[in-house]
Image (tube, helix red, strand yellow):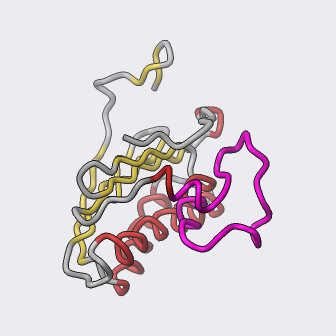
Amino acid sequence: MRQNGVRKSMEKFDFIQMSVPAKPEYVGVIRLTISGIASRMDFSYDDIEDIKVAVSEAATNVVSHAYEGEGKGDLTLGFGVYDDRLEIMVSDQGESFNYDEVKERIGPVSKKEQVSPITEIREGGFGLFLINTLMDEVQINNKYGVIVLMTKYLDETEVTLHEQVPTE
């Protein structure tokens, strides 16, 4: 719930947290988990599929890049279940990356810019493009490891358009 454009600080929500090894075989477990949570919240089938793809892409980035593909670390997920939205955190303690460099390499991500056809997007970073496209809000913090925060609203009227993905 928003009051004067700001979420109430005492808003009630359920928080679910899980940690899995950063290995490809656990991405399916993550997809099943998020599907169950989003289904319980009464998201539409299409929204559930969008959420699953976005979370899978974030998890796959951790598996592929955070620990140099060795699967020696953990992937931590947090799910904030609110009345009007689902907030999802995917984090790792592996190697960080420079979002601005990746964005420059993959081409336009901003909805304001003219987006290139999918066949012209360069390899590497396509997952970030998908995450930004499929979710209503996305934030990336890459100071210590990487934390990707994604929000999907149940009611599209709650969505505020962001011109770019905020990074810290």
Q: On screen, 92 above or below 10?
A: below
| Count of residue discs | 0
Q: Is residue 5 left or right of residue 89?
A: right
Front position in the image: 91 or 34: 91
Image location (x, y in percent) of residue 49? 59, 66
Q: Can you tell which quarter of the image residue 92 is in? A: bottom left
Res 123 quadrant in image: bottom right
Residue visible at 79% across and 48% down? 114
Determine whether, in the image, residue 93 is placed left or right of residue 41: left
Residue 91 percent across, percent down from the top left: 30, 59
In the rendered image, the vertical position of residue 167 relative to residue 37, given as above or below: above
**81 or 77: nearer the eye?**
77
Relative vertical location of residue 77 with respect to residue 141 in this rendering, above or below: below
Instruction: Report the side of 92 relative to 166 (left or right).
Output: left
Q: Is residue 106 magenta?
A: yes
Q: Residue at the location (31% across, 33% down)?
A: 12
Residue located at (57% from left, 52% from top) = 132
* Residue 90 location (% of width, % of height): 35, 59
Quarter in which the C terminus is drawn: top left
Q: Nearer the viewer, residue 151 or 106?
A: 106
Residue located farthest toward the top when viewing the structure as drawn:
4
Highlighted magenta segment, given as a residue range: 102-130
Instruction: Tell me where residue 127 sits by quadrant.
Output: bottom right
The front one of 68 and 129 is 68
Instruction: Kindly identify the residue that appears in the image at 26 percent across and 82 percent down.
Output: 71
- Residue 129, image x and y in percent? 60, 59
Q: Quadrant of the N terminus?
A: top left
Residue 122 lies within the magenta run: yes
